[in-house]
Amino acid sequence: MKHGMLAALCILLAMPVLAHHGVVLLYHHVDDNTPVSTSISPAQFKDQLDYIEENGFVVVPLLELLKGVFEGRESAAEAVAITFDDAYESVYHTAFPELSARGMPFTVFVATQAVERGHEATMSWQQLRELKASGLASFGAHSQTHGHLLRGSENGITDAWIERVSVEIDESIADLTRELGLDRVQTFAYPYGEYSQGLEELVAARGLYGLAQLSGGVGEGTPVTAIPRFPMSRTQGSLERLAMALYTRPLPVTRLDGAPALINGSGQDPKAFSFSLSAAPAYHRDRLGCFSASGESLTLAREGDRFTVRLPAFQPGRNKVNCTAPSAERAGEFFWYSQQWVLADAAGSWLAR
């Protein structure tokens, strides 16, 4: 009888459930000899996969996680998705064998022009086909050229900008479907993690999920065109940081003001932004804190369920603020929200690089 009950319990624990949140991890290179800011060492990567496996987390395909959260489909309770941007060759030679040995699915976001031109650091179409044949890999679009897609829209949306960016999105999808025999591409990762309302609208019009480079969990209230992913690198690849990411849930932001994603460098930078939080789930509102990307604690004012954050001076490029609050139910778990602003300089020149 006891054995029967234990077997039933094991089956129950293994069954998929309705997932209300999940975490997406972002990698680029898995290599000791590539840029530190976008690389994790092979040893760190292996240790991270071991940690995920040994601590009860379940790696699921990215679309399974997203549809579990946003459409109420079945997925694992402690769901994690693994993604790679840029289709670097080290994913094929180093990451894929480790993932394959564990049966872990993953998604590669491909900037297709580099593959077409045989860039030495990028996988070939044949290598990408081998990943597809494994049954573990899925693929998303990452534009054709991996350019700064916001360039040309800092002073307003124009027909020329819409046409240029539409080609970047549509042709990259066409390349993937043609070369990899895909029926459909449903995800788009923003090059450099840069997005704006205008770009989100183009992504949404195509029925795509938009993947950003912001820290935080994915939940029912997460915008489907600004899905956060925790970036991993040699400087941000410790097991402590991985654990922090895995035990993150989305902070339930319900109303946001004063947070335009793209700023044109005219000197009108926002001085503050405000948001509201829902009462559920259980977290310590009184311990909410907001921080700049450098870790500076920011002034935070509260009026009822409304919070206002005093922003630091922005620099040209990507500027981020992270707001976190500890869980009231699970030690070590944090609720997290990240907001990004992309600032052009007075000439908008940094966007043209």
Image (tube, rainbow, N blue to C red):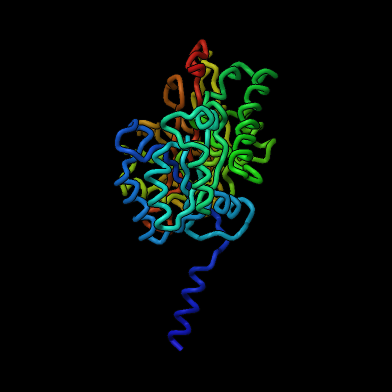
Q: Is residue 295 left or right of residue 18?
A: left
Of all residues, the one furthest to the front in this rendering is 126
Can you give x and y, in whole percent of width and height, for residue 69 in the image? 58, 52
Can you give x and y, in whole percent of width and height, for residue 75 in the image? 55, 59
Q: Is residue 191 left or right of residue 315?
A: right
Residue positioned 55% across, 32% down in the render: 112
Can you give x and y, in whole percent of width and height, for residue 174 in the image? 64, 35
Residue 255 in sight: no
Residue positioned 58% across, 46% down in the render: 221
Q: Is residue 226 above or below residue 271?
A: below
Residue 66 in sight: yes
Can you give x and y, in whole percent of width and height, for residue 231 in the image? 42, 39
Q: Nearer the viewer, residue 109 or 226?
A: 109
Residue 140 quadrant: top right
Q: Nearer the viewer, residue 182 or 323?
A: 182
Residue positioned 60% across, 33% down in the render: 172
